[in-house]
Amino acid sequence: MKENIDVLFIAANARSLLHNRGRLIGSMKAQGLSVAALVPSYDYIEEVEKLDIPIEKYDLDRHSLNPFDFISQLSGLIRKVKHLAPKAVFCYSIKPIALGAVAARLSGVKYVFSLVTGLGYAYCADGLKPRLVRVASRFLYGIAAVVGDLFIFQNEDDKKELSKGWLFKLADVLGKKKIVVGGSGVDIEEYPYQPVPTEGFSFLCMARLIKEKGVIEYAEAAKEVKEDFPDTTFYLAGPIDENLVTAINRDTVTRWEKQHGITYLGQVSDVNKWIGSSTVFVLPSYREGTSRAILEAMSIGRPILTTNVPGCRGPVVNGVNGYLAEAKDVKTLKNLMIRMLNEKEQLQAMGLASRNRIKEVYEVEKVNANMLEAMNEYLAQ
């Protein structure tokens, strides 16, 4: 591992470091900063070496709530950070933030930056366990805010939600800085504009197959719309991971294919191809940080049909580049699908509005410049 590290990334997983933080790392390197990263051992992929920075592995169990596991992982991370001795750490996602911010401060790191990429399952689910997780996560985020220097949010809703906690109020009293940026941003050259197809009509929902992404509502709405618009195609793309508590299993997807008219694509590698061949991009999610899938679809020039929830509503100007349905509501989703089917002549303009909004607000270089400007106030010292 390289000596004199300016910024050490503590990653949630290797793939997100490469695809979501890669351009930020590149911008830091272009600025002359020395960058390194820690990635979890369990999902390490060789592809991450394309970043051309020193990378080491650390132990992380993203789902365990066992306090003994937490202490063990924190101890291991402290040893790693002490050994690497960076000037600053950049943590993102709940466990790396909770562990990384504390480990950094206990290791004598000068500056701690945290990026909240979404509040996730606990903030969009009901029941005792989600409530307990909300309490725990608000406490852990609050501790990180108090011991850290800069907290970065991807939407105003998440900032308002966490700011209710007494630890965040203490962080304000201590003068800790909070900013909001446009998600992870999107590269408009990597996702170039493609006109909305004029032949046929297809909806595409691209997401992990878990309940919180709204895929159940998508399948139910598709079934009802197909009754009146039988020639409409409903694509569903995304990985199935039955290890997750709220995962949609393969048997359910097979039933949707047979009974709801869903065309399941699996996990696609050519995102541009499938978004480009669709008419409307749909994400009926219950909550996001700022949905990268929506930003990619907007960059390609697609009208968006999503939900009026944090992380989804921000990129969409209702009636201009798409429409907002109510979360967990098949009826409003179905009605907006039918509206878009009946207003096909307006969709090209909506797609252009999506592309222009990306250029104005969510282009990756602008997003990264905002984060770097905030971090440079500390790094330049």
Image: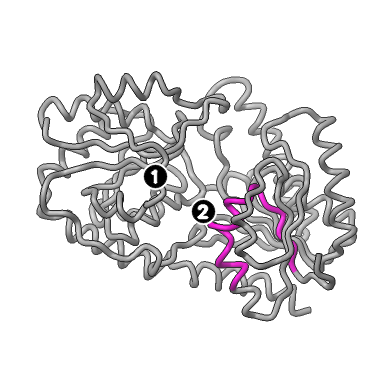
Q: Which residue is mark 1?
A: 268
**Residue 185 in the image: x percent, y percent?**
48, 62
Residue furthest to the front: 46
Q: What is the secondary structure assignment of the residue under circle 2? A: helix
Q: Picture quarter containing residue 317?
A: bottom left
Q: Which residue is mark 2?
A: 156
The residue sitting at 66% across, 58% down in the picture is 151
**Residue 75 in the image: x percent, y percent?**
88, 43
Q: What is the secondary structure assignment of the residue under circle 1? A: loop
Q: Nearer the viewer, residue 6 or 346?
A: 6
Q: Which residues are magenta?
A: 7-26
User: 306 left or right of 134?
Assistant: left
Foreground mark, 2 or 1, reads 1
**Residue 84 in the image: x percent, y percent?**
85, 62
Q: Quadrant of the C terminus?
A: bottom right
Q: Picture quarter containing residue 213?
A: top left
Residue 175 visible in the snapshot = no
